[in-house]
Image (spheres, rainbow, N blue to C red):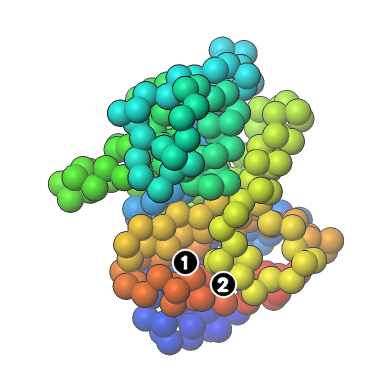
Amino acid sequence: MRKKILKIINEYGINTAIYYKNLENNKKFTLNEKEKLPSASLIKLFIMYHAFKKVSEESLSLEIQIPVNRNDTVEYSIIEALSIDKYSLEDLITLMIIQSDNTATNILINYLGMSNINDTINELSMQKTSLNRKMMDFYARENGIDNWTSAEDVGELLYKIYKDEFRNSELNKKIFAIMKRQIFMTMIPRYLNESYEIFNKTGDLPNINNDAAIIFHSQGNSILVILTKDCKDKYKAQEFVGKVAKIILEENI
């Protein structure tokens, strides 16, 4: 399998990091999994985790109504296009994950607190992950301020979600229900048939295309994270991620 993947990497000329874990036998496949890379929208998984952690501790409610500060709105967002003044915490998380709504994300960062989110990340000992800027803040990116993670950190976060770290089955079901509604299916799910049930979150920026998923299958469940960088052709990168995912999953079931 490694030879096949390295062959595809060579063919596409894409820099990548991979973390795969078979949840039945704990077998792993990794490549550059500890490398610190721009997270793009994968950082939203950590924001979601922090929010549900606070709900599990009963310091927040999913029903609480959070006002929209128009200073947080950015283009190409559902919230930016509507005139609704407030949303529930659950609705903001849902929009952030399934549609990758950047306005919803910025509202959540303001409400939850960037430092509080990073405290949770640090408690998880995920040393390559940090939230340092809001979404669509390209001025910050140009000045070297970005959001970071690694394939391993994302994979370990998904494992915590999978094993119900909060010991609250109802909250865990909500997380899976949200992730199941993901609308961006052009990478890990790209070449997989309907026997795979996929709960994923994508992240992309110029030259960056990432995807991370919990995958259910009748012959075994797994976690797969694929990060890419320095690929100028977005569609080529998506195709690459899809091909790598297909090889890994089909050879490990």
State which mark lies toward you, 1 or 2: 2
The residue where tag 1 is placed is 31
Q: Which residue lies furthest to the left in this view?
A: 143
**Measuring 56% from the left and 58% from the top, which residue is drawn there?**
184
Count of numbered circles on the image: 2
**Measuring 62% from the left and 22% from the top, which residue is drawn there?**
62
Q: Callout 1: 10 Å neighbours few (<14), some, many (20+)?
A: some
Could you tell me residue 42's position as x and y percent?
46, 48
Q: Callout 2: 10 Å neighbours few (<14), some, many (20+)?
A: many
Q: Which residue lies furthest to the front in this view?
A: 83
**Measuring 41% from the left and 37% from the top, which residue is drawn there?**
80
Marks 2 and 1: in contact by CB < 8 Å?
no
Residue 233, compared with residue 4, is above or below; it is above
Could you tell me residue 112's position as x and y percent?
44, 22
Could you tell me residue 170's position as x and y percent?
75, 28
The residue where tag 2 is placed is 242
Indicate the quadrant where residue 231 lies. bottom left
Q: What residue type is labelled 1?
A: Leu
